[in-house]
Image (cartoon, rainbow, N blue to C red):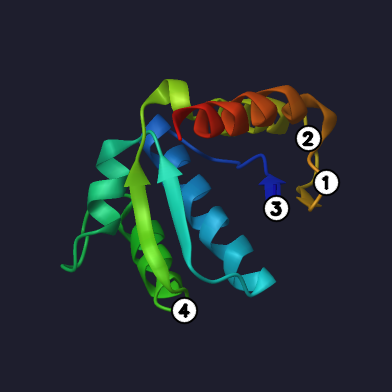
């Protein structure tokens, strides 16, 4: 675990907009921490595809995606990769936690207690595959 952030976004009108905002926050967090050589993961194929596209996005989430693309230029690595929803449980737990927040919260190096078991499972899955 390197870092995580929970943030309750106001005035969000679709799941796609929420996914775009979450992706941007992940990139912002990485830039703030000076992290490099990163591959972000998302279970939203539409967001992953849009962030990998070099043309200007004129959709209703375009400004969010364009911000993310600009920030990604500051990070070396693979950008965004699509993963199955079942492989993204930690993200969904953070999102559920954020529903009850009044202000954003970030974690660095030590994960919050509600993530420990899912992170442990993820690490063991990768270890057992090798």
**Left or right position of 86 against 112:** left
Q: How many C-alpha atoms fall within 10 Å of the one at disc 4: few (<14), some, or many (≥20)?
A: some
At a point 49% along the width and 56% down the height, the residue shown is 24
Q: Do the numbered discs 1 and 2 sit on residues whose CB atoms are within 8 Å?
A: no
Q: Secondary structure at mark 4?
A: loop
Q: Do the residues bearing badges 3 and 1 touch, measured as CB atoms within 8 Å?
A: no
Mark 1 vs mark 2: give the one in front: 1
Of labels 3 and 4, earlier in sequence is 3
- Give me the disc on residue 3: 3
Q: What numbered label is drawn on residue 89?
A: none
Horizontal and vertical percent position of residue 120: 69, 28
Q: CA distance from mark 2 to mark 3?
A: 18 Å
In this view, the residue in front, 57 or 46, is 46
From the viewer's perspective, is the residue at label 2 or at label 3 nearer? 3
The Cα atoms of the two marked residues, 3 and 1, are separated by 8 Å
Q: Which is more N-terminal, label 1 or label 3?
A: 3
Residue at image position (36%, 53%) is: 80
Is 115 displayed left or right of 29 in the figure?
right
How far apart are the two marked residues, 1 and 2, measured between alpha carbons? 19 Å
What mark, if any, has residue 110 been given in the picture? 1
Q: Which residue is mark 2?
A: 101
Mark sitting on residue 74? 4
Question: In this rendering, would 40 be left or right of 32?
Answer: left
Question: Residue at image x 70%, y 53%?
Answer: 3
Q: Position of residue 96 (x, y in %)?
A: 65, 24
């Amino acid at each position: 675990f390197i870092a995580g952030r929970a943030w309750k976004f106001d005035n969000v009108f679709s799941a796609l907009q929420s996914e775009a905002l979450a992706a941007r926050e992940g990139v912002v967090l990485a830039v703030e921490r000076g992290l490099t050589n990163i591959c972000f993961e998302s279970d939203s194929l539409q967001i992953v595809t849009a962030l990998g596209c070099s043309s200007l996005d004129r959709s209703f989430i375009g400004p969010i995606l364009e911000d993310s693309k600009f920030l990604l230029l500051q990070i070396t690595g693979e950008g965004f990769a699509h993963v199955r929803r079942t492989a993204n449980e930690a993200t969904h737990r953070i999102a559920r936690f954020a529903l009850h927040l009044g202000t954003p919260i970030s974690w660095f190096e030590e994960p919050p207690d509600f993530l420990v078991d899912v992170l442990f499972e993820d690490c063991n899955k990768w270890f057992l595959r090798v």
